Image: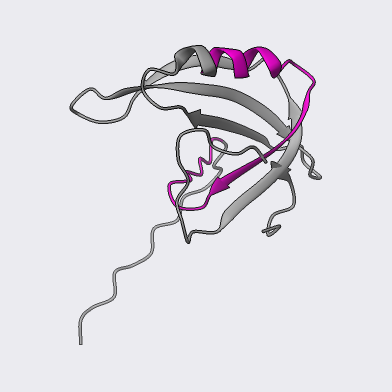
Amino acid sequence: MHAFAGYLSMQTSAHTQANWPDAEYTGTLLHAAEARTTVLDIEGTAVPTLCMEVELDNAICTHLLVEQFFPTGHFSQCQAASKRLKKGARVTVQAPLVGMRLVARNATHIHIHPQEQAA
């Protein structure tokens, strides 16, 4: 699915969400990827996570933070993947739209809409 101006594509190692469309972005790694650990829930489930920041191929060179989860106990595979992803590498990343988070770090105005009264 190429619905966006910039594109990214890397298969998830741990899982994919069937029947949900993927967003795809392509760009250049701003830093070497890192292997980290992410706590997923209140029970403390921790998984190895490949983390990277990509400058997208679009008119304004948007930055995209990418996290790819690996199965519990596969930190060495996550580290091996991070060592292949060096600063300046060209990558394409695919990610399901479900679970994607957008952050407006540079908001200039926030407008409040009046609440509609029930009829």
Q: Is residue 82 magenta?
A: yes
Q: Residue furthest bottom?
A: 119
Question: Horizontal placement of 94 versus 102: left or right?
Answer: right
Question: Which residue is depicted at the point 31% across and 29% down?
Answer: 40
Instruction: Locate the C terminus by quadrant.
Output: bottom left
Q: Is residue 25 magenta?
A: no
Give the colouring mode of the picture.
Answer: one colour
| Coordinates of residue 75 in the picture (x, y in percent) | 45, 14
Question: Which residue is depicted at the point 55% across and 23% down?
Answer: 51
Residue 93 lies in what quarter of the image?
A: top right
| Coordinates of residue 115 in the picture (x, y in percent) | 29, 69
Residue 27 lies in what quarter of the image?
A: top right
Instruction: Locate the N terminus by quadrant.
Output: bottom right
Question: Which residue is depicted at the point 25% across and 31% down?
Answer: 41
| Coordinates of residue 33 in the picture (x, y in percent) | 62, 17
Question: Horizontal placement of 96 versus 84: left or right?
Answer: left
> For the magenta stretch, what is the residue range?
78-105
* Residue in front for this viewpoint, 64 or 21: 21
Residue 31 makes an appearance in the image: no
Q: How many marks?
A: 0
Residue 48 makes an appearance in the image: yes
| Coordinates of residue 13 in the picture (x, y in percent) | 52, 33
Question: Horizontal placement of 97 versus 87: left or right?
Answer: left
Question: Which residue is depicted at the point 38% across and 64% down?
Answer: 113
| Picture layout, residue 29 above or below residue 62 | above
* Residue in front for this viewpoint, 42 or 11: 11
Residue 8 lies in what quarter of the image?
A: top right
| Picture layout, residue 60 above or below residue 31 | below
